[in-house]
Amino acid sequence: MISYNRLWETMRAKKITQYALINKHQISPGQITRLKRNESVSTHTIEMFCKILDCRVEDVMEYIPDSEIK
């Protein structure tokens, strides 16, 4: 499973809100919802978040093996 928990941690650290993503950076609310639900998103979406947050891919997402999911 891909987890986007690191995205929310990175956003908190960089003081960027979901509101700013939607209104300042034109990220669709639907994309944010998909990320909250750990659903699949395109590599383009990941790239946009990395540019906005000035971070690396591993600051946005991580792979968690199924055996580690509770």
Image (spheres, rainbow, N blue to C red):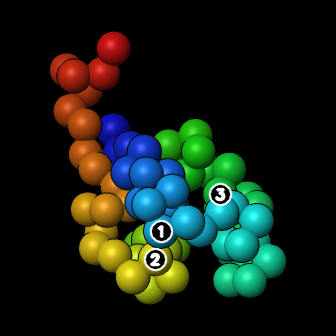
Q: Nearer the viewer, residue 16 or 46?
A: 16
Residue tagged by mark 3?
Answer: 32
Whole-percent x and y of residue 34? 61, 51
Which sits earlier in the primary sequence, circle 3 or circle 1?
Answer: 1
Mark 2 lies on a secondary structure that is helix
- As displayed, is residue 23 above or below residue 34? below
Whole-percent x and y of residue 16? 59, 68
| Kind of residue at disc 1 | Lys
**Residue at image coords 67%, 72%:** 21
Q: Do the residues bearing badges 1 and 2 touch, measured as CB atoms within 8 Å? A: yes
Q: Nearer the viewer, residue 27 or 11?
A: 11
Q: Do the residues bearing badges 3 and 2 touch, measured as CB atoms within 8 Å? A: no
Residue tagged by mark 2?
Answer: 53
* Quadrant housing the N terminus: top left
Mark 1 lies on a secondary structure that is helix
Residue 30's disc is none
| Kind of residue at disc 3 | Ile
Q: Nearer the viewer, mark 1 or mark 2?
A: 1
Whole-percent x and y of residue 18? 69, 61
Q: CA gap, disc 1 to disc 2?
A: 7 Å
Q: What crowding class fits label 1: few (fewer than 14 Cα within 10 Å), some (14-19), or many (20 or more)? A: few
